Amino acid sequence: FSFCYLLQFDDQMKTLTTSLLTLEKACTEVITSKPLAFVCKKLLKIGNLMNGQSATGITLNSLINIAKKKGGSGGKISVIDHLISTSDNCDAMSFKHDMPTLREGTRLDLGEIKLSLRELESGLKSIDSTIKAEQSLMDS
């Protein structure tokens, strides 16, 4: 098992590293996007107006809900569509261009990444055990 594992280790490590770097880059793009922050602030204001609240933050669930919420024009236009069509800040509405890695990052399966990490850890422990067993045989 240990020898076969060693043969596959580099490929598995490259695949996992690529996935983790993509995920990190996508997260950084989301966190640092000023246009996305602008849109989220506008959506927060709209949500507060609609709900009569004064929330100070926005969650993914509330973003999803507000994206689905329709009104005006016979319920055909979503809040986000309205925001985009009435915004005077065209740069802010092109926030997806700030995040070129996001689509690729959302396609990654976090369950698979966790599994790969566990498999690598398990394989390394197995190799460590094999090395220790070989050393104890050599010392005997």
Image (cartoon, helix red, strand yellow):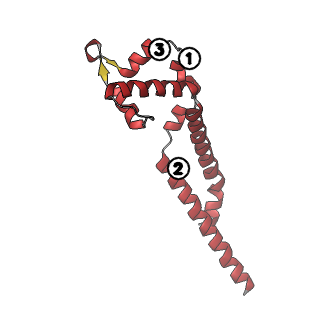
Q: Between marks 1 and 2, how big is the CA–CA gap?
A: 34 Å
**Vertical position of residue 36 compared to residue 122: above or below:** above
Who is closer to the viewer here, 39 or 48? 48
> Where, quadrant-wise, is the N terminus in this rendering?
bottom right
Are circles 3 and 1 on residues that touch, CB within 8 Å?
no
**Vertical position of residue 91 compared to residue 64: above or below:** above
**Vertical position of residue 107 compared to residue 50: above or below:** below
Who is closer to the viewer here, 115 or 40? 40
Residue 119, by quadrant, is bottom right
What residue occupies the far bottom of the structure in this picture? 140
Q: Could you tell me which residue is drawn at 48 percent across and 27 percent down?
A: 41
Three-letter amino acid code at disc 3? Ser
Label 1 crowd (10 A; few <14 / some 14-19 / many >=20): few
How far from the left and from the top, in percent, is residue 129? 62, 73
> Looking at the image, is mark 2 or mark 3 earlier in the sequence?
3
Are circles 2 and 3 on residues that touch, CB within 8 Å?
no
Label 3 crowd (10 A; few <14 / some 14-19 / many >=20): some
Tell whether 140 sits left or right of 71.
right
Q: Could you tell me which residue is drawn at 43 percent across and 28 percent down?
A: 44
Say which element carries label 1: loop
How far from the left and from the top, in percent, is residue 37? 53, 28
Three-letter amino acid code at disc 2? Ile
> Looking at the image, is mark 1 or mark 2 earlier in the sequence?
1
- Residue 91 tag number: 1
> Where, quadrant-wise, is the C terminus in this rendering?
bottom right
Who is closer to the viewer here, 94 or 139? 94
| Front of the two marks 1 and 2 | 1
- Residue 87 tag number: 3
- Residue 113 tag number: 2
